Image: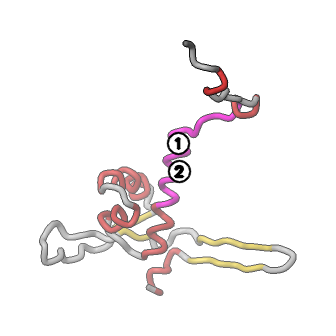
Amino acid sequence: MAPSRKSQPDLVFSDQSARRPLITTSAIGAANRRRVLETLHRLGPSSRAQLARSLGVNRATIATILQPLLDSSTLVEGDPVAPSEAGGKPARPLWFRDDGPWLGAVHLSPTSSWLRGSPSTARSTR
């Protein structure tokens, strides 16, 4: 006996969903860079290993995301930090360059407003 058509739901596609493009690899890369930079700003100067642990990815993934930011001097490497008792290679904390741009946000609404900003030299406040 043939299965009933009523047991299989019909898929419905709107014209609008057919025209919406997939997420491009460059958009995914931009989103990943944004997450790494946000995490770095929240944690303060951090090693690649610390960032990888914080974001739940491996060190190779972090290195791939960070390399263009280092090449463009958006981020700089600090002096090596002594390895832990477990040994290993000395970590080089990454941070925003001293003469980098200001980062900030403004919220304006009929009932409230705020301004939040952080100069790239926020290292001195950590």
**Outermost residue to the front:** 1
Q: Secondary structure at mark 1?
A: helix
Q: Quadrant of residue 55?
A: bottom left
Amino acid type, callout 2: Ala
Which label number is shown at residue 3? none
Q: Position of residue 83 (x, y in %)?
A: 18, 74
Q: Which residue is mark 2?
A: 30
Q: What residue did someone put label 1 on?
A: 26
Q: Quadrant of the N terminus?
A: top right
- Residue 106 locus on image (x, y percent): 72, 73
Residue sitting at 62 percent across and 20 percent down? Answer: 4
Nearer-the-camera pick, 22 or 26: 22
Dividing the picture into quadrants, the one containing residue 81 is bottom left
Mark 1, residues whose alpha carbon is within 10 Å: few (<14), some, or many (≥20)?
few
Where is 56 relative to 46, above or below? Answer: above
Give the farthest residue toward the right. Answer: 110
Residue extent of the magenta highlight: 19-35
Whether residue 13 sits left or right of residue 110 in the image: it is left
Q: Marks 2 and 1, Cα distance to the nearest angstrom? A: 6 Å
The reply to whether callout 2 and callout 1 are in contact (CB within 8 Å) is yes
